[in-house]
Amino acid sequence: MHPEPTRSPEPAQREPKRCSACTQLKPAEDFYASHGRLSSYCKACQWQAARRAYRRRRDDPAARARMRAVDRRRKQQERARLARLDPDRERRTSRARRAAARRLIAAHHTEYLRLLRHELAVADRGGEHRG
Ligand SMILES: [Zn+2]
């Protein structure tokens, strides 16, 4: 019936649509679809809105702390999920990290010694430095 591209995953509206934010008439592909419906904002406007919201939250210390807590929890849950799927993963990963660190040190031995001396000096002063 419709001469639509067969790759479109949604049976949603495929006619051009007007974005509620920028008021431009845009092709359906310029809108995200969810549950078979197109978003009222175009992708560009949604991206900008997300960016503005992120900056607002980032500039607010309390919101930033909440974002970090959410991020930390998400990472913990992801690690736990991966550990359930593959109990040996953590051990393999840490072994690979140690091996990579050894090779990195061998490849940049002079720089490693310089950094090590610096870190030891910092530690001797009480280790107040970060990085
Ligand atoms: Zn728009």
Image: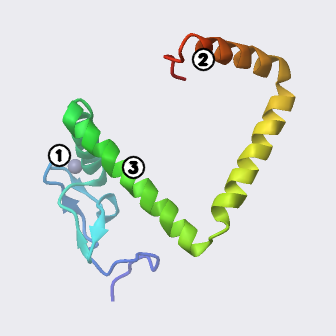
Residue 16: horizontal and vertical position, in percent? 24, 64
Q: Are marks 3 and 1 in contact (CB under 8 Å)?
A: no
Find numbered disc 1 in the image and state the secondary structure of the residue it sits on.
loop
- Please name whichever residue, 118 or 125, is drawn nearer the observer in this view of the structure: 125
From the image, which quarter does the N terminus lie in? bottom left
Task: Tell me how far mark 2 sits from mark 1, CA to CA.
Answer: 55 Å
Instruction: Please state which of the two labelled residues, at mark 3 or mark 1, is closer to the viewer.
Output: 3
Is 6 drawn above or below residue 54 in the view shown?
below
- Please name whichever residue, 121 or 22, is drawn nearer the observer in this view of the structure: 121
Instruction: Please state which of the two labelled residues, at mark 3 or mark 2, is closer to the viewer.
Output: 2
Q: Mark 1 packing: few (<14 Cα in 10 Å), some, or many (20+)?
A: few
- Which labelled disc corresponds to residue 22? 1
**Picture quadrant where residue 75 is located:** bottom left
- Which labelled disc corresponds to residue 72? 3
Q: Which residue is mark 2?
A: 123
Is 9 drawn above or below residue 114 in the view shown?
below
Q: Identity of the amino acid at label 3?
A: Arg
